[in-house]
Structures are given as structure tokens and as C-alpha cells.
Amino acid sequence: NAGVTQTPKFQVLKTGQSMTLQCAQDMNHNSMYWYRQDPGMGLRLIYYSASEGTTDKGEVPNGYNVSRLNKREFSLRLESAAPSQTSVYFCASTPGVSNQPQHFGDGTRLSIL
Amino acid sequence: AQKITQTQPGMFVQEKEAVTLDCTYDTSDPSYGLFWYKQPSSGEMIFLIYQGSYDQQNATEGRYSLNFQKARKSANLVISASQLGDSAMYFCAMREARGNQGGKLIFGQGTELSVKP
């Protein structure tokens, strides 16, 4: 079972370059999320999509854009990468029912030089 | 103010002993859910256990149980009979119901557990 698939797993960018992180889930989940994880700070929500066709800002949206391409796919774009965006990025999905956990992808480790 | 607080940055436990990881939360919403995730050194996030605010009994899943004290706003994870494979980062998270159609989670900062042989 694939679950939530993120690509790429690793990426190194130069400051100012653009990049799109891809996420796809095969569980027919309604809601999808993008988080970043920095040392000592847990996971912080960047953007989320409660259902196909909707997106909303999370706690730390600056410098990012998202697209909910269809029910399966939710991409995260860095238009002009900055060193402060060096982080591990996680995509997650959930059916939307309140007691169901979010299922996470394996993460993308992004370094910006 | 922090909505989820994990006060133990790191903990050690002897193999086969039980360990409690602390989590306190802050919400005025009467309807909420609490989740615990495990993140081993390989990096993936693994769901462990869930407790709903209206659940009458403490949640249990195998060696994991949740010590839910609603009045104290605490949801501590108890791992019984620790194993070497339990060494990992553990995150507590909360989902509030009010105004949260998107099902967003708020995470604590995590506790790093090391199991000693």
C-alpha cells in the first residue's frame, strides 16, 4: 500500500531558485496538508486543503504556494527559495473525520544554500 | 501561548521498563482529539494512539496507553515494557473541532526517548 507519496526525497537548491514538492495519496482522503519540521520546533502547518478545490493558509505560509490539483494530489511550491526554508517537509492526508489520524509521507529533506 | 506542551525534551528508560511521556494542552473547545505520533531516526511519522475529549475510557493500543486527565488538560503517553525499537521522537498533537473543518493538527515540540539495553 503506497499511502502518501512525496517526491523528491532530497533536494538541494540555490537561493532564489524555484521548486515544487509533489504529494499524492491513494486512500481517497478528502483533506491534505503540508508541514515543515525544524529542529526543536515540532511540525508547523504551512498550508492545507480541507477538500478538493479549496486551500487555506496554516501557521507559516509565507514564501510558499500550494495547488490541490485533484483529490489525490497536493503540491507545494517555493517560488524563490531562501536559506530559512531549509527544512524537512511532510505531506499528510486524512479522510476528514475528526477521530481519524493524519497519514504522513516519508518527507522531503530540502537544503537551500 | 503554546497549545501543546511537551516539557521533556529528552528521556531515558531501561529496556523492559515502563515510561511516561508528558503532554499538556490548552483549549477552550469542549470537542477535541489528541494524537500521539512516533518518529524514528529514519524520519517517518507513525500514528500511535488517539483520545477523544468525550471518550469515557483511556485509549489503549497494544503497549501504548494514554493517561487522559481532562480536568488537568493532560494526555500522557505510557509505553509499557520498553523495547530498543521504541527509541524515537514522540509528538503529541491536538485537533480542535470548533472552526476547524480542515482537521488541522497542532503539534508539540516532541520528546526524544532513548531506550537503554
Image (cartoon, coloured by chain):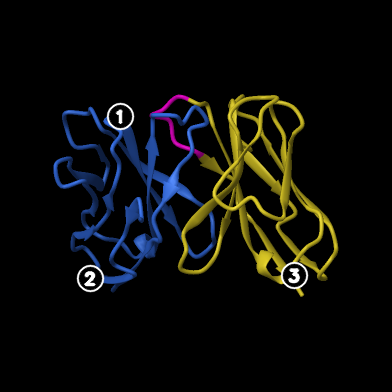
Chain colours: A yellow, B blue
Which amino acid type corresponds to the residue marked 3 in the rendered image?
Ile
**Residue located farthest toward the right when viewing the structure as drawn:** A17
Determine crowd level at label 1: few under 14, some 14-19, many 20+ residues with C-alpha closer than 10 A: some
Label 1 to label 2: alpha-carbon separation: 37 Å
Q: Is residue A92 above or below residue B101?
A: below
The subunit letter for the residue under badge 3 reads A
User: Would you say the magenta stretch is mainly helix, strand or loop?
Assistant: loop
- Taking A12 as reference, is B23 left or right? left
Residue A1, by quadrant, is top right
The reply to whether discs 3 and 2 touch (Cβ–Cβ < 8 Å) is: no
The answer to whether B29 is drawn above or below residue B91 in the figure is above
Q: Nearer the viewer, residue B3 or A5?
A: B3
Separation of marks 3 and 2 at Cα, in angstroms: 39 Å
Task: Find disc 3 in the rendering and name its residue.
Answer: A112
Q: Nearer the viewer, mark 3 or mark 2?
A: 3
Q: Is residue A82 magenta?
A: no
Q: Quadrant of the C terminus of chain A?
A: bottom right
Task: Give the residue pinned by disc 2.
Answer: B14
Q: Position of residue B72 (x, y in %)?
A: 15, 47
Element at label 2: strand
The stretch of residues the image draws in magenta is: A97-102
Q: Nearer the viewer, mark 1 or mark 2?
A: 1
The amino acid pointed to by label 1 is Ser
Q: Which residue is mark 1?
A: B31
Q: Are marks 3 and 2 on the same chain?
A: no
Residue plotted at (71% across, 55% down): A63
Give the vertical position of B80 relative to A47 (above or below). Answer: below
Q: Which residue is painted at 38% across and 35% down in the image?
A: B96
Mark 2 surroundings: few (<14), some (14-19) or many (≥20) residues within 10 A:
some
Q: Nearer the viewer, mark 1 or mark 3?
A: 1
Give the structural element (helix, strand or loop) at label 1.
loop
Q: Is residue A51 left or right of residue B1?
A: right
